[in-house]
Image: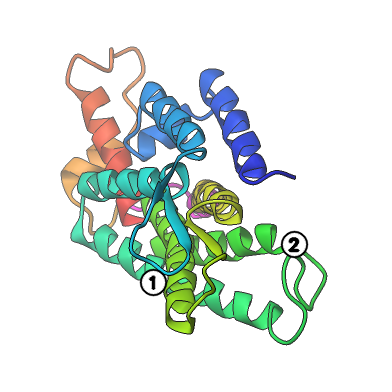
């Protein structure tokens, strides 16, 4: 399959879900509108075909716009919109942890004479293994949907940067080509981010429901009020419950 093909197919599928309104709740938790999410997806897809050359290097190298620059820009936007410093820390620590684990896994399966795509285990293609591992680690550290997405995308991208630095240190030949965030890395970054968000949505909500709903002990009164549903037969917008509930959902997502 051509480079970026898997990532583009997945992004198109996600776009359809967003258009049908099936991802509205997740996007709300990530502080993204439907139009904003579709715009980002379009930029990633189009940017996947654009590489910005990096001059003054001994081999052919470039930065892919869709696989590197757009995800970094989106991650910065989500970090700025993060409600607490705790979420900042989780996202950044998760980024480093994801990068380290994916790098170690990559080193293990590609050690010796057997290299990609399947590696020496020959069980799962690295293009699926890396985002799967990255998505799981990112969720465990990031926890919230924003934190998990940031950790997954930046973590996998950081691995590509590690590889780039290693090639420079090893003195890659002049005919070698390296595209940061491009080719297989593009697919891995896209899949890792989506897997991390899905895990945050499914596991986070499941655990919350099993525990009887959002916890209210030792939490601010405003948050507790925002998490409650409006009373029957009372318009939600009369006393501001709609705004409080939305704020409460956002804070609940950050705390989880």
Q: Which residues are magenta?
A: 206-215
Residue lying furthest bottom: 112
In the rendered image of this protein, does residue 122 appear above or below residue 36?
Answer: below
Nearest the camera: 25 or 53?
Answer: 53
- Of labels 2 and 1, earlier in sequence is 1
Q: Quadrant of residue 94?
A: bottom left
Quadrant of the image for the C terminus?
Answer: bottom left
Colour mapping used in the image: rainbow
Does 211 sit left or right of 240 as displayed? right
Does 173 sit left or right of 155 as displayed? right
In the rendered image of this protein, does residue 62 appear above or below residue 11?
Answer: below
Check residue 207 for magenta coloring: yes
Q: Quadrant of residue 236?
A: top left
Mark number, residue 50: none
Residue that mark 2 sits on: 125
Residue 98 in view: no
Label 1 CA crowd tier, 10 Å (few <14, some 14–19, many 20+)? some
Does 221 sit left or right of 182 as displayed? left
Residue at (29% x, 32% y) in the render = 246
Report, in whole angstroms, how far the alpha carbon at label 2 lies from the one at label 1.
23 Å
Nearest the camera: 187 or 240?
Answer: 187
Residue at (24% x, 49% y) in the render = 82
| Badge count | 2
Check residue 54 for magenta coloring: no
In the rendered image of this protein, does residue 36 appear above or below residue 255?
Answer: above
Residue that mark 1 sits on: 96
Nearest the camera: 191 or 45?
Answer: 45
Q: Position of residue 171 (x, y in %)?
A: 48, 80
Does 48 sit left or right of 6 as displayed? left
Say which element carries label 2.
loop
Residue at (17% x, 41% y) in the render = 222
């Amino acid at each position: 399959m051509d480079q970026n093909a898997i990532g583009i197919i997945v992004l198109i599928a996600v776009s359809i879900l967003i258009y049908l309104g099936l991802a509205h709740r997740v996007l709300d938790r990530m502080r993204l509108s439907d139009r904003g999410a579709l715009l980002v997806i379009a930029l990633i897809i189009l940017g996947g075909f654009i590489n910005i050359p990096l001059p003054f290097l001994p081999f052919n190298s470039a930065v892919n716009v869709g696989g590197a620059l757009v995800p970094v820009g989106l991650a910065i936007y989500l970090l700025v919109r993060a409600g607490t410093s705790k979420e900042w820390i989780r996202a950044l620590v998760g980024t480093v942890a994801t990068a380290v684990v994916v790098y170690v896994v990559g080193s293990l399966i590609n050690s010796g004479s057997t290299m990609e795509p399947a590696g020496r285990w020959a069980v799962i293609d690295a293009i699926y293994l890396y985002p799967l591992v990255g998505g799981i680690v990112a969720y465990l550290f990031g926890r919230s949907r924003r934190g998990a997405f940031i950790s997954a995308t930046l973590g996998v991208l950081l691995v590509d940067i590690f590889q780039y630095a290693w090639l420079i240190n090893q003195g890659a030949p002049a005919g070698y080509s390296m595209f940061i965030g491009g080719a297989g890395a593009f697919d891995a970054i896209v899949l890792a981010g989506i897997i991390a968000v899905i895990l945050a949505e499914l596991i986070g909500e499941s655990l919350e429901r099993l525990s009887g709903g959002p916890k209210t002990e030792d939490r601010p009164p405003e948050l507790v009020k925002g998490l409650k549903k409006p009373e029957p037969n009372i318009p939600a917008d009369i006393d501001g419950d709609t705004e409080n509930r939305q704020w409460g959902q956002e804070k609940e997502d950050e705390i989880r």
